[in-house]
Image (cartoon, rainbow, N blue to C red):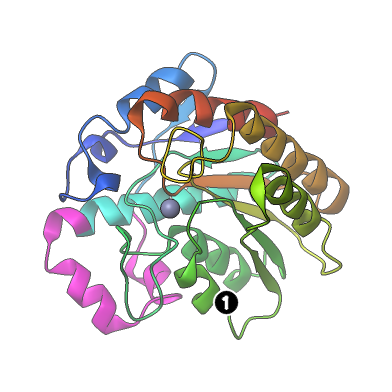
Amino acid sequence: MKVIFHPRFYEVYTSDPAAAPGRMEPMVKALEKEFEFVEPGPASDRDLERVHGKNHIQSVKRDPQVYEVGLLAAGGAILAAEMAFEGQPAFGLIRPPGHHASPHSCWGFCYFNNIAIAIKKLVSEGKIKAALILDFDLHYGDGTSNTFNDFSSVSYFHPEGTGREGFLEETKRSLKTDKPYDLVGISAGFDRHEEDWGGLLKTEDYFTIGKWAKEASIARCQGRRFGVLEGGYNHSVLGRNVRSFLQGLSD
Ligand SMILES: [Zn+2]
């Protein structure tokens, strides 16, 4: 399991909670001894244009820092997906997050839809035909869902369930979909944790979800799997939550 990270993700590129100072450091600290880190390059305009309209890209460009860090985040997701395709599971420890970025608009601390850009690239290059996206963030990834609305070979799942057990049950079920998939991409938001905004999941649940995603990918698509960071705002628990998830997801 490789972790994709760029030092520019430490930058406080704006004033929202995803860009908050001190958010990435505890995750890096929790992962750097156990996992090898790899630095991504920026996504290209062409990569962005597979998902976003030119006007949207132009509007993000007006803030050069957000644009530059955003390109690296999208590039990080692309690298994670490419490594996964080659048989090496990977996690994009990236920000800004992406799942609220639609083709022509964005909100919720997101600018470019990292996971959608990565998956569309693999599809357009003919590497994969179908993909499953599991989004366990507290919030519905409207941007991801909008991107793949007319794209039936990419299935987007955002489990809700009732209570902790119901949520986990629905997560497990989504991985057992009848629809075929060649790759599993995970929008990993940790804001549903019991000490974060959602107040629901325990740290060990992220291990369980990671393990289920690993098992499903081995059974269904030669183990091809990657994740990218979305939300998660309590800096004091983010490190152990992301580590727990990666321990479950890795071989
Ligand atoms: Zn969220």
Q: What's under tag 1, amino acid-wise?
A: Phe
Q: Is residue 182 magenta?
A: no
- The residue drawn where x is 41% and y is 75% is 102
Front residue of 204 and 6: 204
x%, y% of residue 215?
81, 40
Q: Residue furthest front?
A: 163
- SS majority, magenta: helix
Does 139 sit above or below residue 80? below
Q: Is residue 220 left or right of residue 31?
A: right
Q: Residue at x 68, y 53 (%)?
A: 184
Looking at the picture, does residue 208 appear above or below residue 230?
above
Q: Residue 227 at x, y = what percent?
A: 56, 45
Q: In front: 131, or 237?
A: 237
Q: Is residue 88 above or below residue 112?
A: above
Residue 222 screen position, x and y as percent: 81, 47
Residue 44 part of the magenta segment: yes
Quadrant (top left, top right, bottom left, bottom right) of the N terminus: top right
Which residue does the image show at 71% across and 34% down from the upper left?
208
Numbered circles on residues, count: 1
**For this view, does 24 lie left or right of residue 12?**
right
The CB of the residue at mark 1 lies under 8 Å from ligand 1 = no
Please determine whether, in this image, residue 59 is positioned above or below residue 228: below
Question: Considering the image in quadrants, where does the C terminus appear?
Answer: top right
Q: Residues within 10 Å of mark 1 (few under 14, many from 20)?
A: some
Residue ID for mark 1: 148
Q: Position of residue 15 (x, y in %)?
A: 15, 49
Q: Which residues fall within the magenta stretch?
A: 42-66
Is 248 or 73 nearer to us in this picture? 248
Q: In what element is the residue under mark 1?
A: loop
* Residue at 44% across, 49% down: 230
